[in-house]
Image (cartoon, grey):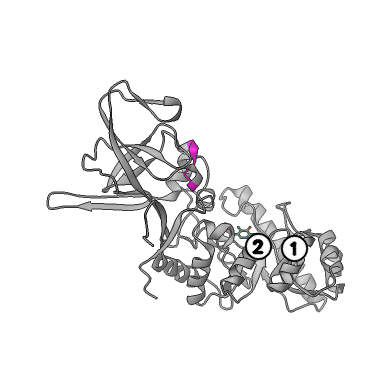
Amino acid sequence: MYEKTRAWIELNMDNLLHNVEQLKSHLSPGCQLMPAVKANAYGHGSILIAKALNQMGIRDFCVAAATEGVALRKAGIEGQILVLGYTHPESFDLLVEYDLTQTVVDAAYAGILADYGRPLKVHISVDTGMRRLGERSEHLSSILSFWKYKTLKITGLYSHLCVADGTSPMDVQFTLMQFQRFDTIVDALHQKGIDGFSTHIQGSYGFLNYPEYHYDYIRPGIVLYGCKSLPDDQPRLELSLRPVLSLKARLSSVRTLLPGESAGYGLTFTAQKPLLIGTASIGYADGIPRSLSGKGYALIRGKRAPFIGRICMDQLLLDVTDIPDASPMDEVVLIGSSVFSDSISEFKNEICVEELALQGQTISNEILSCLGERLERVENHKSF
Ligand SMILES: *Cc1c(COP(=O)(O)O)cnc(C)c1O
């Protein structure tokens, strides 16, 4: 089996370790990481990432769907796996069989989980203002009543912040209120003599912008992968983060485009002068947003090659006129760095996912989590 043949992801696990150490160095004593490895670990590959994190001493993970937890268990991941999202009662057997911890998404769902009859581990979600999942924080008696259900083993209580990435006074005020609502519930439960559950509320930005708040876990996703959601985000805690993922493809063909000739679906691009164009073997089905047609660029031999025409499902076209040596089989870098040096010259260039996100009018999280299943995932520089 050859590697890196068409389009692939390279995972720099040294950078993952670096990011883990960066986060750990700012955690309060007793607080642990519960990395978000949902959506195939933000496209990185959940099994490779969870196994690497295991080797770094991290045992607990959160996922969005029960099936994601099952995949981790089948790969030998042993710690707590929290399912953050909804699980249909038809799938409750999976929770038991694979020892997954289910989120209680509201009071009605607590009843449904209890009706199942078999013992289940759960974390209670508290809605402190996002209005997505969780029992409302004002409903103390309802939350208290979950402890009546004999088959529910409540091992955690958590909430989720919805404007923790914002730095406006309104966003800060709202987030502080969310923390306060959460703390009020936790204190009230403790006062009623209820204990033995862990607490967590911060994801990446909740931790970076509010590092002075301390709970049993943080649930980092995007920062662990070494990225910010957008390039201009400046969280209060500025960690030195290193991107774990590079995205690369092969140049499959190079050809000339004569003046007046057009290229690609819809013939949307027309050459004004003779051009050298290259075809890269990666497309929107691999996760390159089609909305970047005519906007982004890739790197070949350390130099920039602009996207031209429409991005296809499996391929895209590049203007390689300024890279006259560009040849079939060259590496095309879509995310990551590209270096070229010979006796005369040296080029180095880098594309970060944040840049792509900005161009595509989205956030890094979406670009990464949409990276396709058929991309090969290759581990690099593994030194631990
Ligand atoms: C996805 C998710 C996280 C991780 O989010 P990041 O912003 O990537 O750190 C944490 N908690 C919940 C409930 C989530 O859905």
The residue pinned by badge 1 equals 91
Q: Which residue is drawn at 60% across and 66% down?
A: 71
Q: What residue type is labelled 1?
A: Ser
Q: Are marks 2 and 1 in contact (CB under 8 Å)?
A: yes
The answer to whether residue 205 is seen in the rendering is: no
- Quadrant in the picture for residue 136: bottom right
Q: Which residue is drawn at 59% across and 60% down?
A: 38
**Residue 345 located left or right of residue 110:** left
Q: Dot 1: what SS?
A: helix
Cα separation between marks 2 and 1: 9 Å
Q: Say if disc 2 is inside 8 Å of ligand 1.
A: no
Front residue (pair 124, 185):
124
Q: Which mark is residue 67?
A: 2
Q: Dot 2: what SS?
A: helix
The spot of residue 261 in percent (x, y) is: 33, 23
Q: Give the range drawn in magenta.
A: 286-291
Q: In which quarter of the image is the N terminus?
A: bottom left
Q: Which amino acid does label 2 sit on?
A: Thr
The spot of residue 92 in percent (x, y) is: 76, 66
- Quadrant in the picture for residue 112: bottom right
Front residue (pair 54, 204):
54
